[in-house]
């Protein structure tokens, strides 16, 4: 095993994870107002609902499929499915949801680049992360094409061994497992690890956001203009008379005497 292979697939994943965790903690602690999705739906709703739904449905299934497929040990899933059948299932389901995600992502990119209002509120990282996701998605779909040349599931087992070895803190074993796989798989894995590096510096942080603080916040009093209060005003007791107000006489201007105080000549 070469040192370069160990650096990319044995050490780099831990470096990327450290950057992701420390960078996310620092951003949340120092710049909480930037921890948001930066939704542009209020600026332009054109094709937003279709594109967003296709992208998010596809990406959520893909992430869940990768998590289960890579981290489930071979001895566990062999009780109900073989490696070849698992690969075929991953190819069919991953291809379907990958195409859905690709259509939604292309629509989102086209909207962000062509809509003047959305473009004006976008920064460089917003556009950059969309194209990185596009490249990663295309690489993932290309791995499906490459997998048609070996339907025995051997490459999937090696990729699973790589991920499981990283989780169990065995970087040497992880790098050795992935060394023999094809280039397209290595590029897909490498760019996927790089997404962890980009995570704390882009809007991807909204993936781990949840309105937890909303459950413990105080109630907000909201009043509408022109709406009478729900509680009626207290009525004055019967026989109540308001005290008469005393009207004070206007003060005389300085230097002038009033009529009663005027001295006879």
Image (cartoon, rainbow, N blue to C red):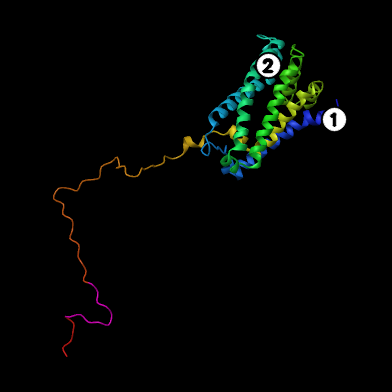
Are the two marked residues, 1 and 2, in contact with CB atoms closer than 8 angstroms? no
Is residue 102 in view? yes
Disc 1 marks which residue?
3
Indicate the quadrant containing the N terminus: top left, top right, bottom left or bottom right. Answer: top right
Q: Kindly identify the residue that appears in the image at 60 percent across and 25 percent down.
A: 60
- The stretch in magenta equals 250-259
Callout 2: helix, strand or loop?
Answer: helix
Specify whether 23 is left or right of 232: right
Given residues 45 and 33, the one toward you in this image is: 45
Q: Is residue 26 above or below residue 250?
A: above
The quarter of the displayed image where residue 139 is located: top right
The quarter of the displayed image where residue 76 is located: top right
Indicate the quadrant containing the C terminus: top left, top right, bottom left or bottom right. Answer: bottom left
Disc 2 marks which residue?
91
Q: Kindly identify the residue that appears in the image at 58 percent across and 38 percent down.
A: 115
Specify whether 86 is left or right of 207: right
């Amino acid at each position: 095993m070469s040192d370069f292979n160990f650096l990319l697939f044995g050490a780099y994943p831990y470096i990327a994870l450290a950057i992701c965790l420390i960078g996310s903690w620092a951003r949340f602690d120092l710049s909480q107002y930037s921890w948001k999705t930066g939704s542009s739906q209020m600026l332009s709703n054109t094709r937003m609902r279709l594109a967003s739904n296709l992208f998010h449905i596809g990406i959520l299934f893909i992430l869940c499929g990768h998590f289960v497929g890579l981290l489930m040990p071979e001895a566990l899933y062999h009780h109900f499915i073989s490696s070849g059948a698992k690969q075929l299932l991953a190819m069919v389901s991953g291809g379907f949801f990958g195409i859905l995600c690709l259509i939604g992502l292309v629509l989102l990119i086209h909207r962000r680049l062509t809509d003047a209002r959305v473009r004006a509120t976008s920064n460089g990282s917003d556009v950059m992360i969309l194209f990185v996701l596009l490249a990663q998605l295309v690489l993932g779909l290309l791995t499906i094409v490459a997998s048609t040349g070996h339907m025995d599931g051997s490459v999937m087992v090696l990729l699973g061994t790589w991920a499981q070895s990283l989780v169990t803190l065995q970087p040497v074993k992880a790098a050795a497992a992935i060394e023999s796989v094809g280039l397209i798989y290595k590029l897909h894995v490498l760019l996927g690890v790089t997404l962890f590096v980009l995570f704390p510096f882009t809007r991807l942080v909204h993936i781990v956001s949840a309105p937890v603080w909303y459950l413990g916040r105080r109630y907000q009093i909201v009043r509408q203009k022109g709406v009478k209060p729900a509680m009626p005003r207290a009525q004055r007791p019967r026989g109540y008379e308001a005290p008469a107000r005393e009207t004070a006489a206007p003060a005389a201007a300085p230097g002038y005497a009033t009529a009663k105080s005027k001295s006879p000549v």
